[in-house]
Image: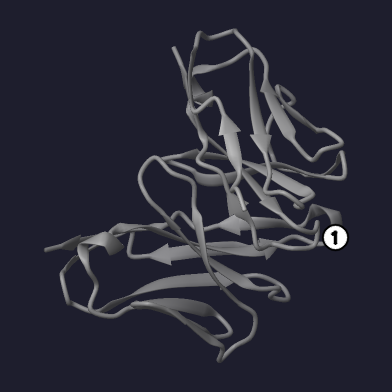
């Protein structure tokens, strides 16, 4: 069974631009969570989607948004990029919204210059 | 406030030198403790889930144990390929606000 895939793997953007990241969960998994990972803060929860509905949101500004499609694929968007948004963005999927056994993708490395 | 603390931040071992990694947690009503391994430039890889004090799980050279306040990841006779960052996480918050909260991780280096 194929794992979680994320595209693109690497991105370089300029401050003020916006970016969209994509995640395809494991087949059959309906819950998708997004995390931001930085050396200083570690893994921080962004949001979770289940059946196209956002179930939970972390403490990030409104510039960070996401959505989930009917096939469970998910996208996250960051508008008006700041230097501090440079990070590894990870997507994780699980079978149920009540399952914390999550399977991660390889991540998208975003660099903001 | 729900918290997860891992120690030490980094650990360097000689090949074959067994040791333990610690994960302390403060959470109301534990709903599982999760261990992940993360290699540089990759996403975390799921290792174990523990649900109750006294529970143990093993995988190759790794054994995870759980008490009411902490979990240990014991590494027996490690090899260089065990070098990675090990993360632990617990579900924190209640209801719709519940989310997986991670520790900062322990970076393990095993020298041949």
The answer to whether residue B27 is above or below residue A104 is below
Percent position of residue B45, x then y: 49, 56
Residue at x-position 74% and y-position 63%: A99
Q: Quarter of the image containing the C terminus of chain B? A: bottom left
Number of labelled discs?
1
Q: Nearer the viewer, residue B7 or A43?
A: A43
The answer to whether residue B9 is above or below residue A113 is below
Residue at x-position 85% and y-position 60%: B95
Q: Quarter of the image containing the N terminus of chain B? A: bottom right
Query: Taking A105 as reference, is A27 left or right?
Result: right
Q: Which secondary structure, mark 1?
A: helix
Residue position for label 1: B95
Q: Badge 1 sits on which subunit?
A: B
Percent position of residue A41, x then y: 48, 43
Q: Nearer the viewer, residue B96 or B14?
A: B14
The answer to whether residue A90 is above or below residue A76 is below
Percent position of residue A54, x then y: 84, 40
Query: Taking B40 as reference, is B100 left or right?
Result: right
Q: Quadrant of residue A61?
A: top right
Residue at x-position 22% and y-position 68%: B79
Residue density around tag 1, few if under 14, some if 14–19, many if 20 or more, within 10 Å: few
């Amino acid at each position: 069974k194929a794992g979680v895939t994320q595209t693109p793997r690497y991105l370089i953007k300029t401050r003020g631009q916006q970016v969209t990241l994509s995640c395809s969960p494991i087949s059959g998994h309906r819950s998708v969570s997004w995390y931001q990972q930085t050396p200083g803060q570690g893994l921080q929860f962004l949001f979770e989607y289940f059946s196209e509905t956002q179930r939970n949101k972390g403490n990030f500004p409104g510039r960070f948004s996401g959505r989930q499609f009917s096939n469970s694929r998910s996208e996250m968007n960051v508008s008006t990029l700041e230097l501090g948004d440079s990070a590894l963005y990870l997507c994780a999927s699980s079978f149920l919204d009540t399952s914390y056994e999550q399977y991660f993708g390889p991540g998208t490395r975003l660099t903001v210059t | 406030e729900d918290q997860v603390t891992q120690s030490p931040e980094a650990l360097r071992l000689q090949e074959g030198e067994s040791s333990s990694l610690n994960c302390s947690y403060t959470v109301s009503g534990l709903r599982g403790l999760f261990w992940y391994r993360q290699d540089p430039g990759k996403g975390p890889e799921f290792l174990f889930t523990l649900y109750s004090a006294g529970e143990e799980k093993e995988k190759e050279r790794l054994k995870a144990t759980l008490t009411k306040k902490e979990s240990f990841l014991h590494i027996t006779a490690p090899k260089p390929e065990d070098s990675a960052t090990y993360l632990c996480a617990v579900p924190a918050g209640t209801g719709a606000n519940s989310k997986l909260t991670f520790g900062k991780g322990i970076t393990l280096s095993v020298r041949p």
